[in-house]
Amino acid sequence: MKINFPSNFLWGTATSSYQIEGAANIDGKGKSIWDTFAHTPGNIKNNENADVAADHYRLFKDDVRLMAEINMHAYRFSIAWTRIFPEGRGTVNQKGLDFYSKLIDELLKNNIKPLVTLYHWDLPQKLQDKGGWLNRDTAKIFSDYAETFTKKFSDKIDFISTFNEPAVFSIHGNVDGYMAPGIKNKDIYLASLHHINLAHGYAIQSMRSIRKDLELGCVLNLGPCVPCSDSEEDINATNIYDMYWNRAFLNPMYKGYYPSALENELKKYIFSNDIKNIYQKCDYIGLNHYQHSRVKADKNHLLGARGAYYNEKPFGLSNDVELTSMGWEVVPEAYYDQIMELKNLYDDPIIYLTENGCAYLDKIENDGKVYDNKRVEYYKKYLSAVKKAIDDGANIKGYMVWSLMDNFEWALGFDKRFGLIHIDFYTLKRTPKNSYFFYKDLINNNGF
Ligand code: GCO
């Protein structure tokens, strides 16, 4: 059966600055919390870091050419705040602006629409030294950065997201401690959560004042939460986890209120106009989705509830469930359910599917090819779920594969390969995988 997508559907891929750019210390770039975190022994598998990564900073033209060769419509990437403001604020680093200028021009020349994310986790270290997201001032400083960027590029860019996955970086960075800045403290997490929401709201206001018709929003990692057993503890834990994971940003940003239990916890951080400032008109929800979360109660965890940690198997799994090499479940039904939940509970928003994908242990065979057929199967399943949601009325405008190329997978370093393009991290050679050619046909047929 052929699956067709609506005309004008936007097909693209996604990446993020720290995971691919490399060039960690050149052209005036400042240090981010990920530079610091990755250089602290014991934080990253095999003590790897992304100083070089895929060296996209130097090789971006090759990467754009690879996108152009399959007629990709859009490319979602993030801006390294520290290239533009090495210290987070103050003097602009012209060379940093120049890099993004060249990248954006190259995309436009090739008819690829740039989808920009302002913050994909690489907070300037200098701001972290002053408390990072714990510090309320960071919200305004972020909005100033958003304003500078938008002033410079609003004639070339139509689509900007404030944050990528605030729940992920605030929980794993401040509660679990296995992502930068590596903190385990519930108060810091709660204050950060609120200040990130505030930063989003301020930034939307400042960008909107520069160009009214920009497409603005936030990218959230959402997924249905399911208890890992039928025990009462696990069922309660699932509601708690859903609140922190799915609602803590989505609700204030898109509905104008916190879940009441969370509002209670945040009392001392919420000032009088904050909610009004956070709740700004957005043009879309960016949905990143990989799997549902199987939740268990955990008294030793600061939130009392958690999903599996990086590299842990999902809890309460039955044997017949397929897992990717991240240990993540292949459950396209959860994707469908998540999309339909947004449609039904969040006023039928415009949705961009800003990330979806899978890691496998891909390697280059003797004939020089990468037969990542499992990835192709994965995309067929997940895209069938997307199509079903569209048929059922979801307002989905586009789909971005995570990821264009293999990259630095945070605490797990380089061995989790998500790309359509294989990267040899020693020679930096790019090798399109089978899934890249699948994507080419998909784009050219607007379906498969
Ligand atoms: C995230 C990020 C990406 C990841 C990808 C795979 O979701 O964590 O947006 O940076 O690399 O999701 O884990």
Image: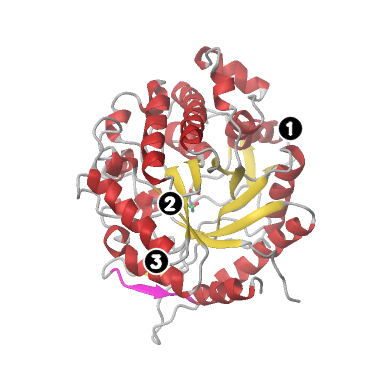
| Helix, strand or loop at mark 1 | helix
Mark nearer the N terminus (3 vs 1): 3
In magenta, the rendered stretch is 428-433
| The N terminus sits in image quarter | bottom right
Query: Which image quadrant for residue 85?
Result: top left
Nearer the observer, 326 or 242: 242
Q: Where is mark 3, residue-wise?
A: 64
Left or right placement of residue 337 versus residue 144 in this view = right
Q: Where is mark 1, residue-wise?
A: 232
Please check the rendered image and state whether residue 430 is part of the magenta-colored stretch, yes or no.
yes
Compared with 124, 189 (above or below) is above
Q: Are marks 3 and 1 in contact (CB under 8 Å)?
A: no
Q: CA distance from mark 3 to mark 1?
A: 51 Å
Nearer the observer, 86 or 145: 145
Q: Position of residue 230 (x, y in %)?
A: 75, 40
Nearer the observer, 334 or 8: 8
| Helix, strand or loop at mark 2 | loop
Residue under the point 73% across and 43% down:
348
Dot 2, how many residues are within 10 Å of its Cα: few (below 14), some (14-19), or many (20+)?
some
Dot 1, how many residues are within 10 Å of its Cα: few (below 14), some (14-19), or many (20+)?
few
Q: Position of residue 330 (x, y in %)?
A: 63, 60
Q: Position of residue 170 (x, y in %)?
A: 47, 34
Compared with 272, 76 (above or below) is below
| The C terminus sits in image quarter | bottom right
Compared with 2, 238 (above or below) is above
Residue under the point 53% across and 62% down:
12
